[in-house]
């Protein structure tokens, strides 16, 4: 338990001293840690393991989150606006009411993720995997879905919305 307190205290102290834009946590293992309400905007968090972590209300705006693992993480009300989430693993992540406006999620894996009430305006989901993703009640104004994959289990904000008209590809295989 002392190790958990230590690393989280070290992160907070580094942010307080240098500012979050100077923080580089690349490759850190923070699975199952509680980073709720942390300020990490513009931080480099490439390949960080946040699996099953509590990241509610965290500020990750403009952060670099490429190849980062958020599998089953709690990201409710998180700020991920303008974040770079290339090839990020967001399988079964809880992203209710989060801000992903203008975020880049190219090749991100969102299978089974819940994004109800999220702001996805102007986000780029090129080649992302949206099979089984819940997007009910989301703002998708200006979203780029070209070449993203979805299936019949994917829930869209509007039952009459046809993702194929936005360039998404129906993909039923596992």
Image: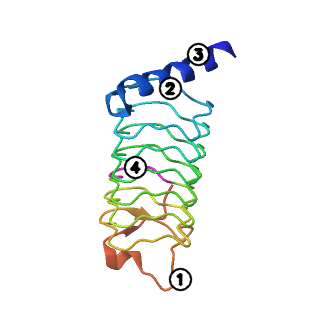
Whether residue 154 sits left or right of residue 63 in the image: it is right
User: Around disc 4, counting alpha carbons within 10 Å, would you say few (fewer than 14), some (14 to 19), or many (20 or more)?
Assistant: many
| Numbered range of the magenta stretch | 105-110
In the picture, the quarter occupied by the N terminus is top right
Q: Mark 1 sits on what residue?
A: 159
Q: Residue furthest top?
A: 2
In the rendering, at what x and y percent does residue 36 appear?
A: 59, 40
Q: Nearer the viewer, residue 120 or 160?
A: 120
Measured in 3D between alpha carbons, the distance from the residue under mark 3 to the one under mark 2, in whole angstroms, is 10 Å
In the rendering, at what x and y percent does residue 154 appear?
A: 53, 67
Measured in 3D between alpha carbons, the distance from the residue under mark 2 to the one under mark 4, in whole angstroms, is 28 Å
Residue at 36% across, 44% down: 87
- Contact, CB < 8 Å: mark 4 with mark 3? no
In the rendering, at what x and y percent does residue 103 appear?
A: 35, 54
Q: Mark 4 sits on what residue?
A: 108
Instruction: Tell which circle, 4 or 3, labels the residue nearer the N-terminal end.
Output: 3
Q: Nearer the viewer, mark 3 or mark 2?
A: 2
Measured in 3D between alpha carbons, the distance from the residue under mark 1 to the one under mark 2, in whole angstroms, is 43 Å
Q: Mark 3 sits on what residue?
A: 6
Measured in 3D between alpha carbons, the distance from the residue under mark 1 to the one under mark 4, in whole angstroms, is 24 Å
> Dot 4 lies on which element?
loop
């Amino acid at each position: 338990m002392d190790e958990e307190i230590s690393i989280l205290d070290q992160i907070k102290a580094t942010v307080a001293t240098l500012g979050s834009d100077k923080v580089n946590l690349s490759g850190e293992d923070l699975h199952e840690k509680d980073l709720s309400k942390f300020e990490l905007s513009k931080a480099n968090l490439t390949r960080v393991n946040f699996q099953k972590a509590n990241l509610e209300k965290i500020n990750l705006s403009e952060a670099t989150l490429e190849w980062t693992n958020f599998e089953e993480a709690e990201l409710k009300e998180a700020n991920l606006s303008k974040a770079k989430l290339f090839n990020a693993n967001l399988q079964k992540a809880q992203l209710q009411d989060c801000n992903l406006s203008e975020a880049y999620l190219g090749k991100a894996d969102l299978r089974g993720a819940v994004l109800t009430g999220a702001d996805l305006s102007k986000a780029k989901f090129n080649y992302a995997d949206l099979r089984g993703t819940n997007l009910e009640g989301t703002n998708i104004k200006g979203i780029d879905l070209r070449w993203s994959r979805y299936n019949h289990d994917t829930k869209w904000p509007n039952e009459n919305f046809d993702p194929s008209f936005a360039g998404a590809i129906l993909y039923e295989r596992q």
